[in-house]
Image (cartoon, rainbow, N blue to C red):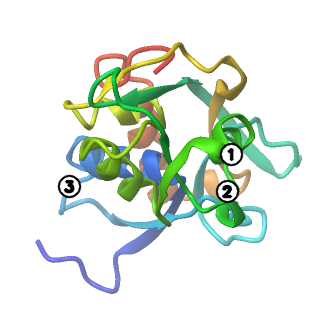
């Protein structure tokens, strides 16, 4: 079945790595005959769910506004990865674009060791796979790159909860409800993402 304009669009916003994970797992929570279609809005800055800038968001903290509903799906941990523990230097987002906690952490702790920069997190992982430098990744994202190995301890200050968030009223809309249930099942499935990954 081909998606038609009559099919409800559910806008899903998440950071780069969570968006990539959801894209890989899409067949687990959406099929072509569903009564909704996913619209991914990859963003490392928050889209305003309260003002309906997106229908569903995956966030790194509990929503504070009373009109937003949230469900904790687990915790996310980060570590340093490289193709071997002999690799020196880091790859990072350009310092002026370092908006995420992990990007700021690299510049705060290893700014003088940055060997190369790129504007997308995916490109940073590709540079690390090419041996250009070490990269800080969420542990679940590192699993997408089998040639990378963890070369440092978990970075405790980057650990955070993950929350599935939507507008309090919007969560009762059948397409949004179906998307929420499917995404929650994938994000909490410990066979896909081990606890603490």
Q: Is residue 69 visible?
A: yes
Residue that appears at 87% across and 43% down: 64
Question: Please, what secondary structure does the residue beneath circle 1 have?
Answer: helix
Residue 42 position in % (x across, y down): 49, 63
Mark 2 → mark 3, Cα distance in angstroms: 36 Å
Along the polypeptide, which appears first: circle 1 or circle 3?
3
Lateral position of residue 172 relative to residue 145, left or right: right
In the figure, residue 134 lies in which quadrant?
A: top left
Q: Which mark is residue 31?
A: 3
Label 3: which secondary element: loop
Query: How many other residues sit within 10 Å of disc 1, few (<14), some (14-19) or many (≥20)?
Result: some
Query: Who is closer to the viewer here, 1 or 81?
Result: 81
Pair 2/3: label in front: 2
- Is disc 2 surrounded by few (<14), some (14 to 19) or many (20+) residues within 10 Å? some
- Residue 168 x %, y %: 73, 51
The residue singled out by tag 1 in the image is 107
Residue 164 vertical position relative to residue 157 in the rendered view, above or below: below
Q: Quadrant of residue 87?
A: top left
Residues at marks 1 and 2 touching, judged by CB atoms closer than 8 Å: yes
Q: Residue at x 88, y 49 (%)?
A: 65
Numbered disc 2: secondary structure: loop
In the image shown, does 194 or 66 lie closer to the viewer?
194
Q: How much space separates mark 1 and mark 3, taking CA atoms?
A: 41 Å
Residue behind mark 2: 98
From the viewer's perspective, is the residue at label 1 or at label 2 nearer?
1
The quadrant in which the N terminus is found is: bottom left
Query: Where residue 5 sits in the image (x, y, percent)?
Result: 33, 86
């Amino acid at each position: 079945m081909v998606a038609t304009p009559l099919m409800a669009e559910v806008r899903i916003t998440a950071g780069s790595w969570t968006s990539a994970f959801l894209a890989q797992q899409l067949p687990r929570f959406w099929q072509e005959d569903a009564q909704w279609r996913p619209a991914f809005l990859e963003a490392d800055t928050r889209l305003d769910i309260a003002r309906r800038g997106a229908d569903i968001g995956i966030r790194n903290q509990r929503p504070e506004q009373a009109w937003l509903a949230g469900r904790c799906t687990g915790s996310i941990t980060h570590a340093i990865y490289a193709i071997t523990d002999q690799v020196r230097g880091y790859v990072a987002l350009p310092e002026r674009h370092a908006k995420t906690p992990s990007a700021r952490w690299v510049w705060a702790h290893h700014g003088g060791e940055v060997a190369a920069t790129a504007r997308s997190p995916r490109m940073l992982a590709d540079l690390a796979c090419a041996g250009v430098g070490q990269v800080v990744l969420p542990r679940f994202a590192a699993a997408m790159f089998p040639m990378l190995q963890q070369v440092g301890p978990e970075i405790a200050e980057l650990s955070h909860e993950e929350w599935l968030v939507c507008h309090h009223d919007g969560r009762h809309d059948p397409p949004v409800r179906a998307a929420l249930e499917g995404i929650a099942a994938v994000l909490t499935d410990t066979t896909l993402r081990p606890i603490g990954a």
